[in-house]
Image: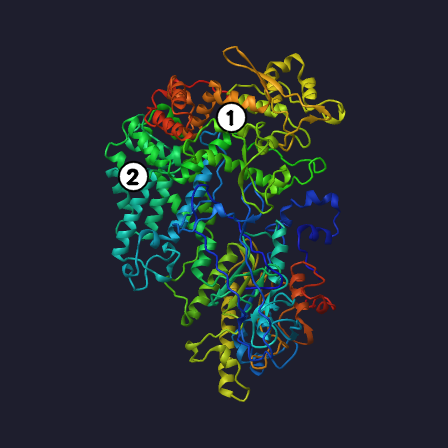
Amino acid sequence: MPHASTRRDFIRNLGLGAASLPFILNLPSLGFANQTRRKQRLIIIFSPNGVVPETFWPAEEGDKFALKESLEPLEPFKKRLLILHGICDKVRGDGDNHMRGIGCLLTGVELFPGNIQGGSHTPAGWASGVSIDQEIKNYLQKDPATRTRFGSLEFGVMVPERADTWTRMVYAGPNKPVTPIDDPYQMFNKLYGRMKDRAVLASVLDDVKNDLKKISGVVSSADRKLLEDHAGFVREMELELHADAEAKAGHKVPELEPGVREENDNLPRLSKMQIDLMVNSFVNDFARVATLQYTNSVGQAKMRWLGINEGHHELSHEPDSNTKAMEKLTRINRWFCEQMAYLAQRLAETPEPGGEGTLLDNSLIVWTNELGKGSSHTLDNTPFVLLGNGLDFTMGRSLKLRRVPHNRLLMALAHGFGHRLNRFGNPDFCGDGALSLT
Amino acid sequence: MKSGSDTEYKANLYLIAGRAYPLRLEFSKAKQGVDDSKNQKSKPPSAQASIVLLWRPPAGVLEPIPERNLMPHQGPEIWVCSASFPPDDRSAGWERATSISKEWHAAVTEANLETTAYVAAHLDELAGVRQTDRNPRPASGDPAGISFDARSAPIASPERTKKLQAFARQFVERAYRKPLSQEQVIAIERQFGSDQDPDVAVKRVVLLALQSPHFLFRELNVQPDGYDVASRLAFGLWDSIPDQELLRAAQTGGLKTPEQVRKQAERMLGDPRARTKLRDMLLSWARADHGLDLSKDPKRFPGFDEQVLADLRTSLELQVEEVINSSDADFQRLFLSDKVFMNGRLAKFYGVDLPENSGFTPVSLDPGKRAGVLTHPYLMTSFAHATESSPIHRGVFLARGMLGVSLRPPAEAVTPLAPELHPTLTTRERVALQTQVGNCMSCHGIINPLGFTLEHFDAVGRYRDTDNGKPVDATGSYRQRSGALIKLTGARQLGEYLAGSDEAHAAFVEQMCHYLTQQPIRAFGPDTANELKLAFVREKFNIRRLAVEVMAATALASREQQSAATLPNKR
């Protein structure tokens, strides 16, 4: 049964006439917490270099399935999981599979020709279209009911300081890549910097007022009038700042562990800091869309804390016969999965502010990868693991689809927000419409 | 990185005129990424690559940055705060700050926060903290109070704290423009007390200083001390704070007499900020920025486009700059010169012989018929309608701006008669027809005869002998305040009259004083206006010397007399 999304729909469903609406809407028994739709959120997590299919995909199809090793950390959330096997990135064009793997992943459209040469194929530039997270963000920002301070936040962890096709996943438009912020202190500054400064300002106003009083005593009467006006404005500002502070008292400003350097071995700590900041930004409703990019396409993170000293990308090119390498790759992907599980757990234990349930009830986490398998560079069976009840999909299933272009999944994400796109990215791959996952 | 056909990268920047900003442009051509040269069977021909740096200044068009705006020297980094302030009071016809408002205070707060954030982000650089001053151990202080560059986590290094404290004190001293009192020094030290994070302490000190009336208001003393005089000089000539030499002079009692003030002012005039301020004063005197729409009918004036308009503006600025920077800075040349700066594009439009790609160079335009700035095509264009000249606008400009006549606004707002309704009349005849009603003539009796003298210049500033088929009648007149009626025919006679006119000198002197001090001239005593005018004549109308004289007459004035001498000033 379609659940009513507004008070008016509910009334309409009850069969009551429009004339009775003004009267009935004020009845206490029909009082909802607020008249707006529930908040919906989308989070996209990216990890590079493909997966080991045998240890990743569940063998079963349907709502009874067992999680393989790489996905085991998500066991507590099994009923809210949706695992999609068989989604393929069909976009071709310039750039090698890695570049297209990340560049076309969220955009569903070809890369421009350019001067970045990959390991094969023709050199390419940026993607030639907007990415789905920005498309949804623009849709949400247009409506005052779903508008937030930032709309979307782009997080990163250990993203190299280069701007090229391998390091950018999010696009605000053709040739408009968006840089992820991988420095948690910089992200903190973006979210709370101005607030911290205003707090410092509020704390010095007493001294300002004293200063003004002292000077008022020694200036001429004409000047005194100006100083009194000034003191009046300072008093007003003080009241505003205090009212501000009280309003924000309910939302905790996160405390960041200080002095964490951006280096490979700190990946776990940086990841946790970014996830904590992300959850906090949802609590304060700074954004409804977020992306979290771990390193980059062809990422070379060395997961020493797992006992792995080789770079991720070089490991991913080992042949299947190298069982040791495969086991390491499985553990690497399992570690990424643990990050997703941590995010899910934080969302599940945080109540939805001003609403019902938890943040996870209203969020959808999408974990994806640039490639289906690292050694073959295949773009078929691109991993897509969805978690959360944010978009009214039917969760708790493992699906085996038949070579579905991923554009259709991107459209389904938009549809979940009420943005009924009938094409996204390259229209050749949108023919059959949005994937139906409800 | 090159991608697709993306070739344009844009940004907006807020800059203040008269300052030098360092500019660096890096351009490299390569294929980026994996080296696949072994795969290529034959090397492709090397393609040409080029880059051009364009800008569009306000009231300008998009063009490569002109050479005269570039200089091959390094400069220090300048940071400009971009908070937007409400406009100042212009009710008297010139800008002055008469009161403060909520919007002003909100803008001040916005600017404070912006500045504090910049200082915090560049703190180590500004305070001269070196690597060796930092404590290598990671921090353990309050995480919410850490500086946002916490990767180096330099908390609790005594050497660094000392430097930050010295910087904080220096910052406040510069902001207050005078040495700090003992009380103020103790207050700063208190912020850096034992358990305060020094970065947060600097932020508090900076915020406090920028909110304080010591910074926001120009002077608090009734009798200006040496530092107040230094501030008046710096604000007057540079729109900035005193430099080290001014502060030293203030400290050693070297700013007590008009002669000492003159010496400092002479020195300060050498700074590009002073030249820019004088240039802007002249442009404001010439009413170059009244903001009306300057587009013209493309059928009547084919080829008069945005580019030409931007070039005309540049031409006017160059002319004014040339006068200011010349050895005698002669004010009279503003009325008498017949040289106009033109480039190839302007020469083509105005019928002057210059190569098409020529840069700006002074050319003689309609020799014997023009009168300096008065007939500059930019001004003639701006005091005109889309197709016809406007003797009324020109007359008001001459009466109010040049001669200092106070005119009330018209009793009723009237739209000009459309030329199509009177197809046989010249502009002069049409204007006379509309304003001949008795009530109007009380002002138009002054305005019209002045404006008619410029009728030889059409709506884009070209010289013409006929208007609508009839010969142009450029006869006019002006009744001096002494009562004498001066007859004038054509721009040349007008220019010569104004160059020697006592009233024009007085008007210019008054406007210079208003522009530099932002105070009514009568605030400095009933005789100041006349004394300055006499000095102006004595110095052979040298504009730079006039600026010096204005500072000498105003920088030492006590503020006590002002409250008694406020006269209503309609200009």
Residue occupied by mark 1: B91
* Rendering quarter of residue A65: bottom right
Q: Which is nearer the eye, B182 or A125?
A: A125
Chain that bears disc 1: B
Q: Amino acid at mark 1?
A: Ser
Q: Chain of mark 2?
A: B
Left or right: where A218 falls relative to B319: left
Q: Nearer the viewer, residue B80 or B466?
A: B466
Amino acid type for the residue under numbered disc 2: Glu
Q: Secondary structure at mark 1?
A: loop
Q: Position of residue A284 (x, y in %)?
A: 51, 54
What residue sits 52% from the left and 47% below the top?
B66
Say which residue label 2 marks: B245
Q: Would you call the spot at circle 1 few (<14 residues within 10 Å), some (14-19), or many (20 or more)?
A: few
Dot 2 lies on which element? helix
Kindly identify the residue that appears in the image at 51 percent across and 27 percent down.
Answer: B336
Where residue B536 is drawn, which disc sits there?
none
CA gap, disc 1 and disc 2: 36 Å
Q: Position of residue A171 (x, y in %)?
A: 59, 61
| Horizontal side of residue A342 vs A389, given as left or right | left
At x 53%, y 19%, the residue is B406
- Residue A393 in view here: no
Camera-nearest label, 1 or 2: 2
Q: Residues within 10 Å of mark 2 (few under 14, many from 20)?
A: few
Q: Is residue A336 above or below residue A16?
A: below
In terms of image quadrants, where is residue A419? bottom right
